[in-house]
Image (cartoon, grey):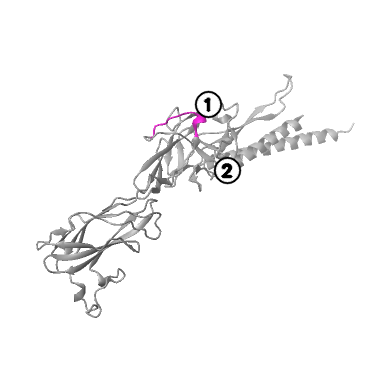
Amino acid sequence: MSFYTSLSGLKGAQTELGTVANNIANVGSYGFKKSRTEFGDIISSSRTTPGNGTRLKNIEQQFNQGGFEATSRELDLAIAGSGFFITRDELTGGNTAFTRNGKFKTDADGFLVDSNGGYVQGLPVDADGNVTATGLSAATNIQIPQTSGVPNATTLIDLTVSLPANADLPADRPVYTAANPYTFDRLDPNSYNHSTQTTVYDSAGNPISATVYYTRTGDATPSTWEARLFVGAEEATPGPVAMQFDAAGNRTAPAGPVTFDPVYPAGASAPLNLTLDLGATDQAAGPFTQRTLNQDGFAAGTLSDVTINDEGLVTATFSNGETSAVGKLAMANFTNPEGLKQLGDARWSVTGQSGDPTVGGAGEDGIGRIQAGALERANVDITEELVALISAQRNFQANAKAIETGNQMTQAIMNLRS
């Protein structure tokens, strides 16, 4: 009988060795929770007979907090306290899993996914970030929008400059003679005095370069200039805009904004209907100075940043300055997390022993808060595991020794002679 008693001890020690080895092997796995073996004795039905060995009762998971590793990556998340992130393995529904591994990223379609490709679940929110529906049935895949807003085509360019009173005329430049009169060429800097450049947008939000070229055409009173507007390589018509300045440098013409015919540059999705407002443009002593340059068009904003606060609110920021509350991370808690079924890769699923999840937001109903820019390391203490490894090894050796001793006793009995 002692053989089988010690054999159960050997099997128990071997199981404990395997459990400790698994803990040590996963010391670098984010969100991993160590396990502990629990044994019970096998009793005999007789009071005069010793027990029959040991049996494995359970390999229990330990869900105590692991240490944090700072990563400074916004989509790396750790839970400070109890709770789990919720993921689903398919875009439409699919199996639900619970994880402590917050190493998330976005896929090609902007969905927030975990390291296994599972879709991270979130609760819907309004524009102010307030949750509008709760519970596991209300959780949906979190998708980060890549653009925001509707593009607006440019219609007005508001431009104010100060033109130098001592600017030369094209006829005064050596390259131009009576035989070779002045001809404007936007690619030839000698054919104009100054230029200003901005970006305008078509109805689809496509950016297009727009340039205004200034050429002095007369230095008498009134002093005269021409302004030519080019959108891309196309000149806006009718043009050029004739400007006049009195002796004090005040602009006397044109009297108001100038509206051009529709211009359709290469790359535009539709013609642009532009108006040029020269504002308080004047002529004065000193260098050419650009005072104001604004235009009223804009493209749709593109995603520039994603932030997640300690309550799990996911906020997207766009290049046009807009922000959007995308959703709030759905979090789950369990009455008995030790009863969860392991799925691997620091993921678990519900069982009858774990009970149904309590779903809410971070910081609610006993659920921990989110720490962005960090990951939870395995809750494995190498020192403790090495001590447990030595203990399991000693237990194995002791049971092996008991079997050896029992074998020697049996051999001695067999060697008895009458």
Q: Is residue 292 visible?
A: no
Task: Please identify the quadrant where the N terminus is shown.
Answer: top right
Q: What residue type is labelled 2?
A: Ile
**Label 1 crowd bin: few (<14), some (14–19), many (20+), radius 10 Å:** few
Q: Which of 185 and 415 is in front in this view?
A: 185
**Mark 2, mark 1: which one is toward the viewer?**
1
Secondary structure predominantly adopted by residues drawn in magenta: loop
- The residue identified by callout 1 is 335
Judge left or right: residue 222 versus residue 146.
left
**In the rendering, at what x and y percent does residue 298 appear?**
34, 50
Q: Residue 400 carries which label?
A: none
Q: Residue at left 53%, top 28%? A: 357
Q: In this view, does 19 lie to the left or right of 258?
A: right
Mark on residue 24?
Answer: 2
Q: Looking at the image, which is closer to me, 306 or 168?
A: 168
Task: Name the side, left or right, on which 406 lies relative to 71.
Answer: right
Bounds of the magenta span? 129-139
Sequence-wise first label, 2 or 1: 2
**Horizontally, is 153 left or right of 245 in the view?**
right
Toward the viewer: 111 or 215? 215
Q: Is mark 2 on a helix, strand or loop?
A: helix
